[in-house]
Image: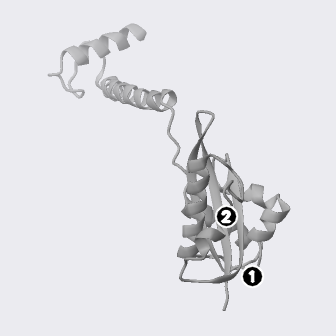
Amino acid sequence: MIGAFSEKKVFFISNGIRRPFEKNGIMSQSIARPVIYFISMRRFDVIIITFAAFFVFVKPVAAAPTGAALLQSINQARNDADLQPLRNSFTLRRAAVGRAADMARFGYFSHQSATGVTYQSWLSAGPVHFNKTGENIAKNFSAPDKVVTAWLGSGRHRKNLLDSTFTHVGTAVRPMMVNGRIVYIYVSVFGRVGS
């Protein structure tokens, strides 16, 4: 049987003039059609195997985390706690972006820089004034949902995250070089609009 298959395979590849429905001296008409499909499937398998091998040997590059994804994770955690979602605020976002950029530029990770810069430094110039604010920061997490999970496990961070009086938030994610590798800094600035 293997010899007949090998002959048939060679016959159809070397002589493309014959049709699968024509009778020949090697195999009957009923066997000829499956062999052609098998040969076609083999070529398809080679393409699939090559395509699959590309994904096995090429390490995919993960998308960088974003402030929008962090906002979505924050609001998911608030939804799970039966709280209203926070609205995105330009003023709070500018404060979060400023904080993240300052930490990345000067290589520190703290709620206050060595020169006394805090997230509130960026809030004072904003068009909207908040009567209550809070800040959460995190570093070295691969995804925003993992950051939010860590914040939920930390008392002060959890308090900011699940504070029912906060109405708005600004989020930012910034890459930072630490010991020759890229880590991400996550900043969320929460606020309640007041008079």
Q: On the image, numbered disc 1 is attached to which residue? A: 165
Amino acid at circle 2: Thr
Please determine whether, in this image, residue 172 is positioned above or below residue 29.
below
Circle 1 residues within 10 Å: few <14, some 14–19, many ≥20: some
Residue farthest to the bottom, as pictured: 195
State the SS at label 2.
loop
State the SS at label 1.
loop
Q: Residue at x 81, y 69 (%)?
A: 159
**Mark 1, mark 2: which one is toward the viewer?**
2
Q: On the image, numbered disc 2 is attached to which residue? A: 118
Q: Nearer the viewer, residue 36 or 57?
A: 57
**Image position, residue 38 (x, y; %):** 37, 26
Residue farthest to the top, as pictured: 3
Q: Nearer the viewer, residue 38 or 63?
A: 63
Please determine whether, in this image, residue 163 is positioned above or below residue 18.
below
User: Which of marks 2 and 1 precedes in the sequence?
Assistant: 2
Q: In 3D space, how far apart are the residues under numbered discs 1 and 2 (Cα atoms)?
A: 22 Å
Q: Nearer the viewer, residue 80 or 66?
A: 66
Q: Residue at x 56, y 69 (%)?
A: 93
Q: Residue at x 59, y 68 (%)?
A: 95
Q: Image quadrant for the C terminus? A: bottom right
Amino acid at circle 1: Thr
Please determine whether, in this image, residue 175 is positioned above or below residue 154.
above
